[in-house]
Image: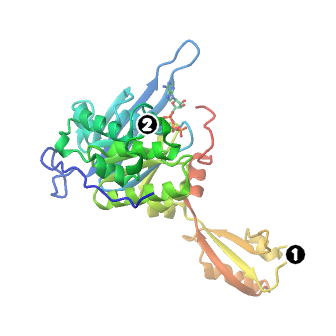
Amino acid sequence: MSLLTPQRPVDLRDELPGSSDGSGLPAFAIELEGLTKVYAGSRRMLPKRALEGVDLKIPRGSFFALLGPNGAGKSTLINILAGLVVKTSGTAHVFGVDIDAHPRRARRVIGVVPQELNLDAFFTPREALEMQAGLYGIPPAERRTDEILAAVGLSDKADAYARSLSGGMRRRLLVAKALVHRPPVVILDEPTAGVDVELRRSLWAYMQELNREGVTVVLTTHYLEEAEQLCDWIAIIDKGHVVACDRKEQLLRQLDSKELTITLAQAPAVLPPALAAMGAELDGLGRVVVRYRPSRVQVGQILEQVRASGCEIADLATREADLEALFLRLTGKRPESEDPEA
Ligand SMILES: Nc1ncnc2c1ncn2[C@@H]1O[C@H](COP(=O)(O)OP(=O)(O)OP(=O)(O)O)[C@@H](O)[C@H]1O
C-alpha cells in the first residue's frame, strides 16, 4: 500500500461552545452521562440491557481504546454516537454537541468506521466517496476524493466496483468514507479484525498522523497489544458498565504487579524450598519466576533471598504487568471470549 498522508481536521472553533484551555475547543471529544440502552425484547427474546448508566469522558486529542469482552456494549455505544441506535436514556455530547439537541451537527463532528463491511457493491470507491461528500453537503470544489483515495492506498482501484475489492480494500474504503468530511473525532469499531499485518500497520500509521494533527481517535479492538502500543487512554467496559477509564500508564500502575525472571547459574531440577516459600515458580526453561507488587517489595529484597538460599544468579529480567493482565483482572475474561449473558 502507498504511504499514507494525513489530511487536516475540520476547524470547528467558530461553531462550538467555549473550552477551558482558551482554544475555543471542548475539553472532551466525547462526554457521556448515564448512557443507557435497553434493546426491546420480542416473543423469543428478553429485553437486553446493553448499556447501564455509562459515564465516560474521552479527552480531546487522545488516542483512546474502548475495550471489553464480546457483547460488553462497545458497538452499541458507538452506534448511538453515530446516530444508528437510539439510546434509552442519558446524555451524549460529541465535540461539545448534544446528540439530541443537534443530531445533524453531532454527525458532522464524528466519522465512524463500522464493524460491518456494509458497502454498496455497485459503486466504485470514487462514487462512494463522492456520494458521501454529497450527503455531508460538501460542494464539489471542496471535495478531496483523490487525496483521500491516495491516503488509504486505493487510487488504483478508484474506478473498480466495490464488489471486486478484497476485504482489506473494503475496510480501507470504509475508513476513507468516514474521513470525507474531515471530522475532528474518528471512531473505529474493530477496524483490524481479520485484516493483514501490512494494512494494520499502515492504517495505524495514518491514524497516528491524524492524531498528531489534533484528531481524537477512538477504537475498539480485540488485539490488546495493539491498544497498548497505540493508545494513551484506555477504558474497559464490561456488561454495559465502564469498569476502568484512565491514562494507560496510570491504569497499568494501579495493577501493581511485576514479574522477575531469574536465570540461575545452575538450572535447578526442583525449586529450592526457600524460593517456593516466596511464591516463586520454575518456568519451562528452568528459570525462577517471581511475581511481586512493586509498591510493597523491592527487587533487591527478592534477590537477597535468592542468594541467601544458596543460588547463584546468572541473569535476570523484569516485566511490567500488561493490558491483558488488567483486562483479565477486571472482567475475568480474555478479550476475545464471549460474554455468557450476551
Ligand atoms: N439489535 C439488537 N437487539 C437486541 N440485542 C442486541 C442488539 N444489538 C446488540 N444486542 C445485545 O446487546 C449486548 C451488547 O452488544 P454489543 O454489540 O454492543 O457488544 P460489543 O461489546 O460491541 O460486542 P462485540 O465485541 O462482539 O462486537 C449484547 O448482549 C448483544 O447481544
Q: Is residue 149 left or right of residue 161?
A: left
Q: CA distance from mark 1 to mark 2?
A: 64 Å
User: Which residue is tagged 2?
Assistant: 161
Left or right: residue 168 compared with residue 305? left
- Furthest residue in direction right, as rendered: 269
- Which residue is identified by label 1? 269
In the drawing, does residue 228 fall left or right of residue 206? right
Residue in view at x 41 percent, y 42 percent: 174
- The answer to whether residue 116 shows anywhere in this view is no
Q: Could you tell me which quadrant the C terminus lies in? A: top right
The amino acid type of the residue labelled 2 equals: Tyr
Q: Which residue: 67% across, 80% down?
A: 316
Q: Secondary structure at mark 1?
A: loop
Q: Residue 320's spot in the image, x, y percent?
A: 57, 68
Q: Position of residue 219 (x, y in %)?
A: 43, 48
Q: In the rendering, at what x and y percent does residue 161 appear? A: 43, 36
In the foreground, 55 or 202: 202
